[in-house]
Image: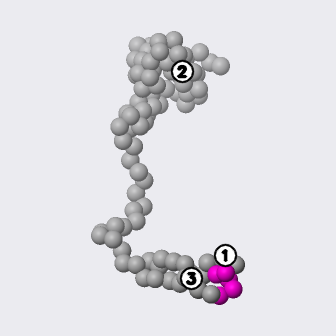
Amino acid sequence: MERLYPVTGSSSRAEAGTPTFHGVEIESVGGATVSTRRPQPMGVSEELAKARKQLRTVAAPESWEAIMDEVHAVQTKDHVSLLAALHTVYAKLAAGWSPQSR
């Protein structure tokens, strides 16, 4: 890896405020490597992803917008978090509720 640093001097470029750079070799630090793995969600993000996936498994694709409308309605009406609303709507679907077509 090459790192650049400014050189001070009396050249006309340096006097004009435009720095000149020279390359310097820098060794890699520890065992740091670049990974191609996608970052895994953690904490609440992971829980939200799992709850959405769970809803998608029981919902018809054409009703997804209506289901998410219901999630937001539950969130507003009951003053609950998005995660709690997702679980509530999942329970409603499991109990036989079906969303109204838009």
Colour scheme used in the picture?
one colour
Q: Mark 3 — residue?
A: 8
Q: Position of residue 45 (x, y in %)?
A: 41, 37
Q: Which residue is mark 1?
A: 17
Cα–Cα gap, marks 1 and 3 = 10 Å
Left or right, 17 with reference to 98: right
Amino acid on which disc 3 is placed: Thr
Between 74 and 21, the one nearer to me in the picture: 21
Q: Viewer-nearest of labels 1 and 2? A: 1
Q: Nearer the viewer, residue 81 or 4?
A: 4
State whether residue 52 is above or below residue 79: below
Q: Are marks 1 and 2 in contact (CB under 8 Å)?
A: no
Would you identify the image quadrant in which residue 10 lies? bottom right
Q: Secondary structure at mark 1?
A: loop
Residue 30, horizontal then vertical, whole percent: 29, 70
Mark 2 — residue? 72
Question: Which mark sits nearer the N-terminus, 2 or 3?
Answer: 3
Please report the bounds of the magenta region as a residue range: 11-15
Would residue 100 appear left or right of 30 to someone viewing this image?
right
Viewer-nearest residue: 31 or 59:
31
The structure residue drawn at horizontal position 50% and vertical position 83%, both measured from the top left corner, is: 23
Q: Is residue 57 magenta?
A: no
Q: From the image, which quarter does the N terminus lie in?
A: bottom left
Q: Which amino acid, mark 1?
A: Gly
Label 2, label 3: how far apart the Cα atoms are: 60 Å
Going 55% across and 27% down the picture, which residue do you hit?
Answer: 64
Whole-number angstrom distance, CA of label 1 to CA of label 2: 56 Å
* Foreground label between 2 and 3: 3
